[in-house]
Amino acid sequence: MELRGKPTAAGRAKAARTTPPDPALERPIPPQPPKPPPTPRARFLRRLGRTLLAALVTAAVVVPVSAAARPRIPAPAPAALAPPTTATLDKAYTANRANAEEASRMAAAHGDRTRAAADHAMAAPSRHFLTFDGRSQGLAVEVLGDLAHADRVAVLVPGSDTTLETYGRFRAGAAALQDHLDSLDHHHGAHGAHGAHGSTSRPHTAVVAWLGYETPGTVSTTVLTTGRAEDAAPPLKRFIHELRGVVGEKAHVSLLCHSYGTVVCGRAARGLDVDDIALVGSPGTGADSVSALRTSARIWAARGADDWIVNVPHVHADLFGTTVGFGADPVSPAFGARVFAAGTGGHSDYFKPGSVSLDNLARIVLGDTSEVTRA
């Protein structure tokens, strides 16, 4: 047996001098080629992952706290009404005002002053609702103007976070549009415009604020998918059909869709009996082009210069069997819409009084397509 002791310092030094250097260790490391920039899809998926994580944390933490602090608000069932006609509009308005007043009393008894105040405002004698449902987030379809005699009708479809509590800001946009239509109507009358009902007097206009679906929350996973829009499309189609029963086939009907509401309109567009569809502040419609919407309506699109929606990636992604994202940008040339000017406004400014976008939307409603300022 060979016995070996520990090497001495001299022995270690000798070994260090006699051991040849390893060429692999001395060879310089070649520079690595730069990584290619991430594709739009990759950037979208990375951003989506962060958004989903934030939404899930919100759902896990905020929602239970909110639910505990604010239980479901009681409200009566909606008034049972047949589809409206010109002869039954006043009956529908009266029934829905009474329903809103009862919903206000029930919300107040429940201790929810915010909802009670919102419902009470809707019960005012000057308000005209075709639909009112105070349950859950709430649904409301309100008429501004004289629908019974209207031959130019605009139907507004809102985006996320529109509920009975926030309905006031949605209605404000509808009211601004109706006011501007009234001012332009007088200009029409001075030039002898022909109304759709065959008269030579100025057109009669009405605006319908259609909160006919449960909108998604801005901070939620539902706002990233078409699920709520797919649920909303059938009631929107039914409403347009019923609206035609009131105003007739000759009336000019425009669908004005904002933000997530453009996804709703995209899902409902196929075969829809409207003359124009305007998409403002759109994250995408779920369709890649105007032809994919399968509609005979003229498609318009606009985006304000200061609208944050420009940062939303326009792609589709399939995650866990669900399609996330809404596809092509409606203001892109490839989509094929008639792009009109929306000025310098932000995401909530399309119906702002005095704005370029409001003026152009009003001219679309009136059928003055040659007067619309193109972008």
Image (cartoon, rainbow, N blue to C red):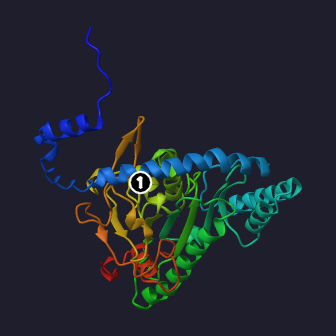
Q: Identify which residue, 318 or 31, lies in the foreground.
A: 31
- Is 297 displayed left or right of 174 in the figure? left
Q: Which residue bears the numbered disc 1?
A: 47
Q: Identify which residue, 176 or 83, lies in the foreground.
A: 176
State whether residue 141 appears in this view.
Answer: yes
Q: Measured from the top left, where is residue 113 in percent x and y?
A: 82, 63
Residue shown at 67%/66% (left/top)? 128
- Is 68 displayed left or right of 225 in the figure? right
Residue shown at 34%/67% (left/top)? 300
Amino acid on which disc 1 is placed: Arg
Q: Measured from the top left, where is residue 96 in percent x and y?
A: 72, 58
Could you tell me which secondary element the residue under label 1 belongs to?
A: helix
- Is 54 displayed left or right of 291 in the figure? right
Q: Quadrant of residue 296?
A: bottom left
In this picture, is 125 found above or below 226?
A: below
In this picture, is 37 found above or below 310?
A: above
In this picture, is 151 found above or below 246?
A: below
Residue shown at 72%/73% (left/top)? 126
State whether residue 268 appears in this view.
Answer: no
- Is 107 displayed left or right of 29 in the figure? right
Residue shown at 86%/57% (left/top)? 111
Q: Identify which residue, 329 or 11, lies in the foreground.
A: 11
In this view, the residue farthest toward the top is 1
Q: Name the image quarter holding the C terminus.
A: bottom left
Q: Measured from the top left, where is residue 14 in percent x and y?
A: 19, 38
Q: Name the image quarter holding the N terminus.
A: top left
Q: Measured from the top left, where is residue 317 in percent x and y?
A: 35, 45
In this picture, is 196 found above or below 13?
A: below
Q: Identify which residue, 275 or 117, lies in the foreground.
A: 117
